[in-house]
């Protein structure tokens, strides 16, 4: 009789222990499924990987287009004394020389960006803008102003007035000499079209072009 009672107690204990194991296993399984479901629900609130890739690609394309646009606008003229000189082709134009009947001169802005010894641009971004008149008929250049720029330049600038006495002859090998020839070369490319021919008749443009080409 005692053996039977012991047997029943042991059987009951094993049954209860087995039930506990089954319950624990089912609880763990349900918990994992709940976590996966919860994670899937949370993912719906964020951008999907393919959408993120698309946004990144669009951003890179936008930066590339902006860079290409800048490179087309600013043409490198020379590198010297830790600076790279760029001609702003967007604002380059031909104007009638003051106190002159039909002579035209180039009105240009040159952008100077300082570089370090490794050739990389310095930070924070800072550059200089120099304003020049270029006179192809006599191979002369006239400096008007220079300003230091950090960010966007101020439109209210002070320049020295135009004067016949301010025309400078070119010294071979000087910065002004290389700037002059680089500016004239790029102005020739565009002198028969766009803003560079502003104010010039076809006859004037042909005459000026022939005189410069000789």
Image (cartoon, grey):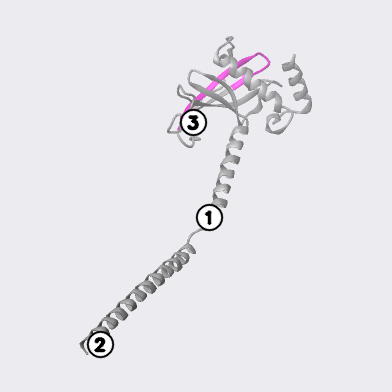
Relative to 115, say whether 178 is above or below: above
Residue position for label 3: 157
Q: Earlier in the sequence, mark 3 or mark 1?
A: 1
Q: Which of these two is toward me, 157 or 68?
A: 68
Quadrant of the rendered structure where residue 214 is? Answer: top right
Residue 54 is situated, as x and y percent measured from the top left of the image, at: 57, 52
The answer for how far apart the CA atoms under marks 1 and 2 are is: 66 Å
Please give the residue where the numbered disc 2 appears in the rendered image.
Answer: 4
| Earlier-in-chain disc, 1 versus 2 | 2
- Res 100 label: none
Label 2 or label 3, whichever comes before in sequence order: 2
Estimate the x, y position of residue 200 in percent, counting from the top left: 73, 28
Which dot marks residue 49? 1
User: How many numbered discs, if any?
Assistant: 3
The residue range painted magenta reads: 133-149
Q: Quadrant of the N terminus?
A: bottom left
Q: Looking at the image, which is closer to me, 69 or 207?
A: 69
**Element type where label 1 sits in the image:** helix
Give the CA separation, mark 2 to mark 3: 110 Å
């Amino acid at each position: 009789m005692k053996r039977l009672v012991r047997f029943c107690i042991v059987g009951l204990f094993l049954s209860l222990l087995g039930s506990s194991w089954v319950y624990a296993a089912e609880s763990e399984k349900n918990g994992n499924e709940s976590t996966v479901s919860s994670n899937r629900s949370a993912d719906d609130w964020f951008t999907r990987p393919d959408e993120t890739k698309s946004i990144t690609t669009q951003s890179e394309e936008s930066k590339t287009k902006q860079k290409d646009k800048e490179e087309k606008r600013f043409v490198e003229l020379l590198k010297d004394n830790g600076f790279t000189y760029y001609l702003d082709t967007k604002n380059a134009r031909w104007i009638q020389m003051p106190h002159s009947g039909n002579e035209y001169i180039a009105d240009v802005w040159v952008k100077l960006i300082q570089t370090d010894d490794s050739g990389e641009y310095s930070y924070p971004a800072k550059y200089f803008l120099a304003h020049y008149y270029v006179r192809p008929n006599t191979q002369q250049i006239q400096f008007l102003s220079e300003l230091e720029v950090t960010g966007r330049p101020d439109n209210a600038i002070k320049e020295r007035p135009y004067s016949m006495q301010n025309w400078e002859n070119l010294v071979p090998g000087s910065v002004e000499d290389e700037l002059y020839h680089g500016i004239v070369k790029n102005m020739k490319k565009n002198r028969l079209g766009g803003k560079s021919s502003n104010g010039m008749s076809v006859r004037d443009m042909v005459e000026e072009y022939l005189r410069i080409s000789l």
